[in-house]
Amino acid sequence: MSVVSKIESILFVATRPLEPKQIGKMIDAKPAEVREALEELMKTCNTEGSGLHLIEQDGKYQMVTAPANAGAVESLVKEEVAGELSRPSLETLTIIAYRGPITKPEIEQIRGINCSMILRNLLMRGLILEEDDADRLQPIYKLSTDFIRHLGIHSVEELPKYDELKADESIEEVLGEAEAALPMEGVAGSRQENAGGKETDENVKV
């Protein structure tokens, strides 16, 4: 697989803009190779007929939808954000609630699958926040203030059985008890904007 192809895939699923050095570490490529690939990708993506554009701001790169397709994207946004939350998304949200702040690799180690699209969906719904962590040298995820407020609490420490489940080694027990305890009824998204991930699992109305 070419460097250009790898970078295109990474930027497509990334939940935030990425610096070339970050991309290089992910695909084990030299800085010069990454810069050359990004330039090539911008030429191929940023055309009139492309549905995705590659933008650069402050030295960071991000894949975005073409402005001409704003109407179609907005329709999907409204449907996804106001619609059902999938079972994988609910499980990931529960993990973030009781194990956060937590990194993407840590979430994926628990769930055993790639969580890029799920995290993007939760971010776009306004249910979680992504912040840079200087100690871990990568983003961490935690519940958003709006979602915590929606749950009727002031902090995650007030979640049902928080101390007990946060320290529990068995993630299956954490997921089972936490999902049963969390007051999730009526949650579709904390804000009515942006689009979500692609899930094939059973959807759950929350």
Image: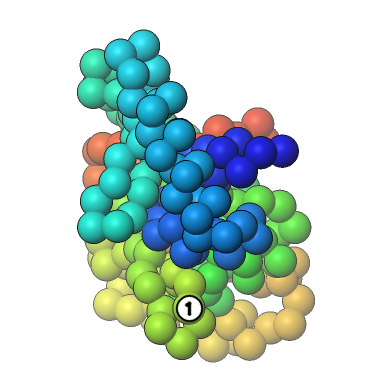
Q: Nearer the viewer, residue 42 or 133?
A: 42
In the drawing, does residue 101 fall left or right of residue 193? right
Chosen colour scheme: rainbow
**Would residue 95 be seen by someone viewing this image from the given angle?**
yes
Q: Position of residue 96 (x, y in %)?
A: 51, 67
Taking the view exactly as shown, the residue that stands out farthest to the top is 49
Q: Position of residue 22 (x, y in %)?
A: 49, 63
Quarter of the rendering containing residue 62: top left
Quarter of the rendering containing residue 199: top right
Give the vertical position of 9 relative to 76 (above or below). below
Q: Position of residue 10 (x, y in %)?
A: 54, 46
Q: Residue at x 54, y 44 (%)?
A: 7
Q: Nearer the viewer, residue 57 or 170?
A: 57
Q: Quadrant of the N terminus?
A: top right
Q: In terms of secondary structure, where does tag 1 sit?
A: loop
Give the vertical position of 178 relative to 74 (above or below). below
Q: Residue at x 45, y 34 (%)?
A: 40
In the drawing, does residue 163 fall left or right of residue 200? left
- For the image shown, how many numbered marks are present on the structure? 1
Number of other residues with Cα within 10 Å of mark 1, as a class: few under 14, some 14 to 19, many 20 or more: few
**Would residue 195 be seen by someone viewing this image from the given angle?**
no
In the drawing, does residue 41 fall left or right of residue 27? left
Q: Position of residue 185 (x, y in %)?
A: 42, 49
Q: Residue at x 52, y 74 (%)?
A: 102
Amino acid type at circle 1 is Leu
Q: Which residue is mark 1?
A: 137
Q: Nearer the viewer, residue 129 or 50?
A: 50
